Amino acid sequence: MKLGARIWMLVSILSLCLLCPKLASSQELVTGWEGYGQRGYGLVTPSYSFDLNPHPAGVVHATNYSFLLRGSGSYLYYTTSQTGGVTDVTSPGVSFGGALRLQTRRLTLTFGPSYEVRWTQDKLPTGQVTHTLEHGIMAQGDAYFQATPLTNLNGIISYEDANQYLWSRVAVKRQVTNTHFTAPRALSIGGEFTAQGNNEIRVYEGGGLVEIAFLHAHASLQFRSGYSREQYPDNSVKTVPYFGAGLYFDLRRHPGS
């Protein structure tokens, strides 16, 4: 199958999923950005979940299995310093794929592949601009562990074959307000570590996070900040502050909601 046909197939399937949310047992939306002026990564990811072991209302399984259809739109940008000078890279992309999810009372695991297309532009030290259409398989996985009713540990990892870009993050957060879950909102604080990059740039980040959970709306808003260490092919290193923000919506069909 030619690349153009693959792109149209990807867009068509994603459009169909966006137009038929009633077929899914739940819906989620994740959007976020992190970085600073010269480097950053932003994305919007809708997903639809289909129960593989549905059960009658009021009956709770110890372990639930589901299949997810999910798409993503992303924008990656960075500068890379090589022996010939500095190159500015911008790379918007789209992807579509599926995943399996296992969920227990305290643990949620999700893993699956996607097919990704990226439109990458390099502005070379000479001023010349090149355009490259990149495509390939992307693998994604995440794990969330509710260690206590107020403490959550989580990790996310993805690898994009289109541009050989790895992104990974581990974090811990602790809910510090509304500890009896009687109010509509709750505040959590925590810390995170992120590692990402490819053969043009490698980034290591560490910092803190603040999250506001809107319990009745099944949504949360998160802010992150810290310092990043960037390493380049010419062996130069740069340390700069980074910032981030994320918004999560859980649109699952809760009884009575």
Image: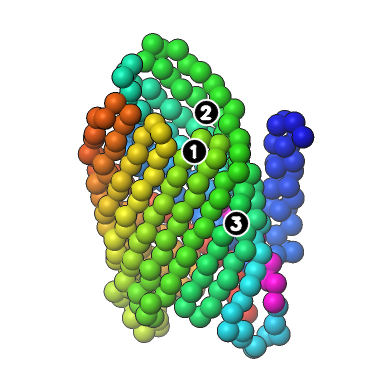
Between disc 1 and disc 2, the foreground one is 1
Residue labelled with disc 2: 120
Q: Is residue 249 visible in the rendered structure shown here?
A: yes
Residue labelled with disc 1: 164
Magenta range is 45-53
- Cα distance in 3D space between marks 3 and 1: 17 Å
Element marked by disc 2: strand
Q: Say if the magenta span includes residue 118.
A: no
Q: Nearer the viewer, residue 176 or 86?
A: 86
Q: Nearer the viewer, residue 221 or 231?
A: 231
Q: Amino acid at mark 3?
A: Gly
Considering only order in the chain, which callout, 3 or 2, is on the residue closer to the N terminus? Answer: 3
**Which quadrant is home to the C terminus?**
bottom right
Q: Dot 3: within a 10 Å radius of its alpha carbon, few (fewer than 14), some, or many (20 or more) residues?
A: some
Q: Is residue 67 above or below residue 114?
A: below
Q: Amino acid at mark 2?
A: Thr
- Which label was assigned to residue 112? 3
Residue at the image point whose x is 32% and y is 55% from the top? 193
- Cα distance in 3D space between marks 2 and 3: 24 Å
Say whether marks 2 and 3 touch (CB < 8 Å). Answer: no
